[in-house]
Amino acid sequence: MKQQSQTLVGLLAIYFGLAGLVFVGTRVEEVIEPPRQPIWGATFMPSYAAFMGNDPRAVLVALLDELGVKHFRLTIPWDRLEANRGQFTFAEIEWQLDEIKKRGGDAILAIGRRTPRWPECHDPAWLKAISPAEQDAATLNLIKTEVEKLKERREIIAWQVENEPLLRVFGRCERHSRKLWQSEVALARQLDGSRPVVTTESGELSTWFGTAPSVDALGISIYHQTWNNWLGKIIYPLSPAFYRRRTEFTRALFNKPVFVSELQAEPWAGAALTELSIDDQLRLEDAPSLRRMADFAASTRLSPVYFWGAEWWYTLREQGQPDVWETAKEIFKNRS
């Protein structure tokens, strides 16, 4: 634990130093230039919508019909797909894709062992009873089954193979080797050569060099405030230019596009949101901060941008606090 904490502190020191250098080297007109509107999207996860006390189908329909969201990042948590070894159930992802297809939308689909939302690796119980080699084989079989089953769904526009696959300092996951991840990427390409293969990297805690050479496009997360059990609340003093310049460098080095696959738009605290009062939640994130994050993302010049936290927006509205939802509605009205 001590070593992990020291590693995190070291990474933060490096990136805050880089952020300062980037900001100092940025011309004033670049900082104050009005942002350009990117293509807006949102991540949606039925299990989290249910965890927040909502009907997942109602949440997705509201995102589609009320907010006008057309572009989604969806996930398939392994424990919900293959709760019993060898028995796959695709009903949950199928109904999401059906609703999106009805409205002419599209989705990036996150597949594999490590997918969005804590604890990151949503392992089925049976996985822990087999050896590491068998776990790796089961992971590749998971990728194979997911792609083969869903590759005829044209509303899927890209496969996101794993989420922050090489990040060691966050999540409850077994060590995921770069070699295994590269095998997953290669397998997805072999099974479906018609779609790009992407992944997501931390915008703050990763160099991006471990995955960028292997994917067709790189998604990054952007967070302004996080929580760590050892350090408490962490604020990232980063400018849009920090992400923009890193993107320019990545494009120059690897010739790969970069987009925002996860933009923080919900609170991150030391407890689950269901354990916090609404006032405490809104002290961390509120309607003005949602607008600020949208403007921040637009100023990076990256596109598309997928918001993180849409299930929370809906929950607030259902609890008599519609301001965040209404702000999101205004943002999506201005979508490109």
Image (spheres, rainbow, N blue to C red):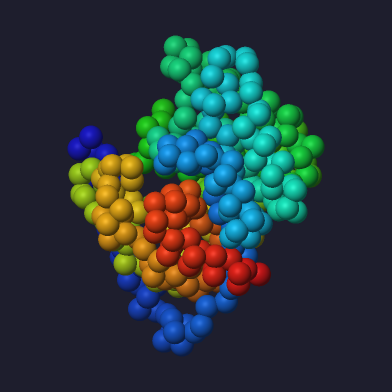
Locate the N terminus and report the quarter of the image it occupies.
top left
Q: Quadrant of residue 186?
A: top right
Residue 51, percent across and down?
A: 43, 37
Q: Is residue 157 left or right of residue 329?
A: right
Between residue 250 and residue 257, name the one nearer to us.
Answer: 257
Q: Is residue 204 left or right of residue 150?
A: left
User: What residue lies at 47% left-to-right and 25% top-to-bottom?
Assistant: 123
Query: Residue extending furthest front?
Result: 320
Q: Quadrant of residue 88?
A: top right
8 over 285 or under it: above or below: above
272 over 15 or under it: above or below: above
User: What residue lies at 68% left-to-right and 26% top-to-bottom?
Assistant: 145
User: What residue lies at 44% left-to-right and 61% top-to-bottom?
Assistant: 322
Task: Please say whether residue 326 is visible from this viewpoint.
Answer: yes
Q: How many marks?
A: 0
Between residue 89 and residue 126, name the one nearer to us.
Answer: 89
Residue 260, percent across and down?
A: 54, 58
Between residue 296 and residue 198, name the one nearer to us.
Answer: 296
Task: Please say whether residue 242 is visible from this viewpoint.
Answer: no
Residue 243, percent across and down?
A: 47, 66
Residue 336, percent across and down?
A: 66, 69
User: What residue lies at 63% left-to-right and 16% top-to-bottom?
Assistant: 87
26 over 48 or under it: above or below: below
